[in-house]
Structure formats: structure tokens, C-alpha cells
Image (spheres, grey):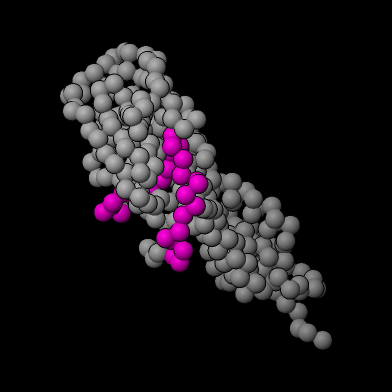
Amino acid sequence: MPSPWKPRLWLTVLLGIVLQPFVFLYVNRPRLFWGYLPVTLVVAGIDWYFELALTLAFSLICPLHAVLIARRYDVSTPRRWFNRASVAVGLYLAVMLAILGARTFLYEPYQVPSASMHPTLVEGNLFVAQKWGFAHRSLFGFTLPGSDRLDAARLQRGKVYVFYPPDHDILYVKRLIALPGDVIALTPDGVVINGEHLPRELLSDTDGVRIYREQLGGQSYRVQQLDSAAQQPIQTFRVPEGHYFFLGDNRDNSNDSRYWGSVAAERVVGQMVWLISKPDHPAS
């Protein structure tokens, strides 16, 4: 007959601090595990959204709650397969790997770093980018196999993408304007692609900022120009094969393909698919 088993207090504290809700598997409270787990994930999302640190509270709450259970543990309770530290650790790692895999290959959240996409995106806006079907994938700084392959059909004029510019190791978010082989001209009257002006209409002209509604590739979006910006000469570019031309919607205040050239296909990370606006950073 096996000897009675009881959770060790020191191990309960350690697992509660490190693994948080998974400690409740070790102390034989699976219902508490399933109760704490979604709450922990929701709080982690709130932390990311509002830039808080509420998740740290669970490093205190979980071990304290688990220690109370361990101290009063009924040794006559049958030990189950998940009442082992190794199982809690293994399940925790499996969940973390699943989250890491989803962020690496499927979807990943980002934050808008600058004003270059005004009025569409505002500094501090949060958005989610779809990564599957795109080329560039890395994990802890290492490029993963298959990062040179891209489903070109996913790159469409007028949509917003996340990418690494040439000779830059910082992610940028801009709008895709021209595809491989296109000839693009930037004029005082707007953008010309392969000899055709992009349709645009003036929406407002206040405080030295002109807002236009521009259309491209079935997409309708707003761009802005500044009255104070110096008049620029007409610029013409031909997009090389396997490359893509990006512009910021803030046309007079954006570091984009006009300055560092077209972006190679294998450096495109993903497409913006979901914009999340903070209360104090409304999307325009």
C-alpha cells in the first residue's frame, strides 16, 4: 500500500511563483486551475493593452492560495496523475510553446511607434498582424527555415504591413503602394502608378493639415499632407522584381521607401488585420 502523499510546502511556493495557476494541479485542485488559467490570460492581455503589471499579482496570489490548500491537505485523498511537479511544469511549457508558436507563425501583436501613419494609425495604437503566408520568421534572433518563401498573393496594394526595411533591424509598419515591376511617381498632386493617378478627394484642410481620401487596390484610406512641408520635386521609382514599395500615410513625415528603397519579399513579416485603439489613442 503506497504511503500517504501531501504537497511539499516549499515546492508549492516555488511552483506558485513560477507557474502560477499550474500549481493547483500539483495540490490536486484542477477546478481552481481551470478557474485561474483564463483569468491569468485575460489579465495578461489587459497588461499588454494598458501597459500595466497586474500579472505580477498572481505571483503572490497563486502561491499563497496553494500553500493554504497544501497545509490543510487531506492525506487520504487519492493522488492523481497530475499531482506531480513534473506534470505541472510540462503542461506549463506546452502552453508557453503553443503561445510562442502562435506568435511566431500565426498572429502577433504590435504597437505603433511613430506618427508616420497618421491619420490611420496613431502612436500607441495596438494592432495584430497575421504572419502565416509571409516569409520572415525568427525566434530569439535566429531566422527559421522557410523564411525566404512568401505567398505573393497576400501582398496587395493599399493594405498595411509589418516589415524590416533594407539594412534595418527594426520593424516598420507602412502601407503597400506598389508591386514588383510597377513604376511609381510621387508628385505634388498625389501618387501615380504606371501612369495612372490614384483617386483622392480632399476631406479637410484645417490647422495646416490637409486630409485626403485615397483609393488603391480596392482599399479606401486617409492620408495627410502638411502645408508647412517644403515642396518636393517629382520622384520616380521602378520597383525591382521580388520587392515592394511602401509609404506612410503621413506623406510629409514618414521614413519610407522614398528614402531606403523597396523592400525585399523575404523581409515582410505580416499584414495588419486587427486594430486595437487605446482610449487615449483613438484611431483616426
Q: Residue furthest bottom?
A: 1
Of residues 189 and 56, the one nearer the viewer is 189
* Residue 5 percent location from the top left of the image: 72, 77
Instruction: From this view, report whether residue 50 is shown above or below residue 38.
Output: above
Quarter placement of the N terminus: bottom right
Q: Quadrant of residue 78?
A: bottom right
User: Residue visible at 59% across and 70% down?
Assistant: 89
Q: Residue furthest front?
A: 195
Instruction: From this view, report whether residue 241 is shown above or below residue 126.
Output: below
User: Residue visible at 44% across and 26% down?
Assistant: 215
User: Residue visible at 29% across and 21% down?
Assistant: 189
Of residues 41 and 250, the one nearer the viewer is 250
In the rendered image, is residue 157 in sight?
Answer: yes
* Residue 247 percent location from the top left of the image: 33, 36
* Residue 103 percent location from the top left of the image: 51, 54
| Residue 256 placement, left or right of 177 | left
| Magenta stretch: includes residue 168 | yes
Which range is magenta? 144-169
Q: Quadrant of residue 93?
A: bottom right
In the rendered image, is residue 139 in sight?
Answer: no
User: Residue visible at 29% across and 41% down?
Assistant: 238
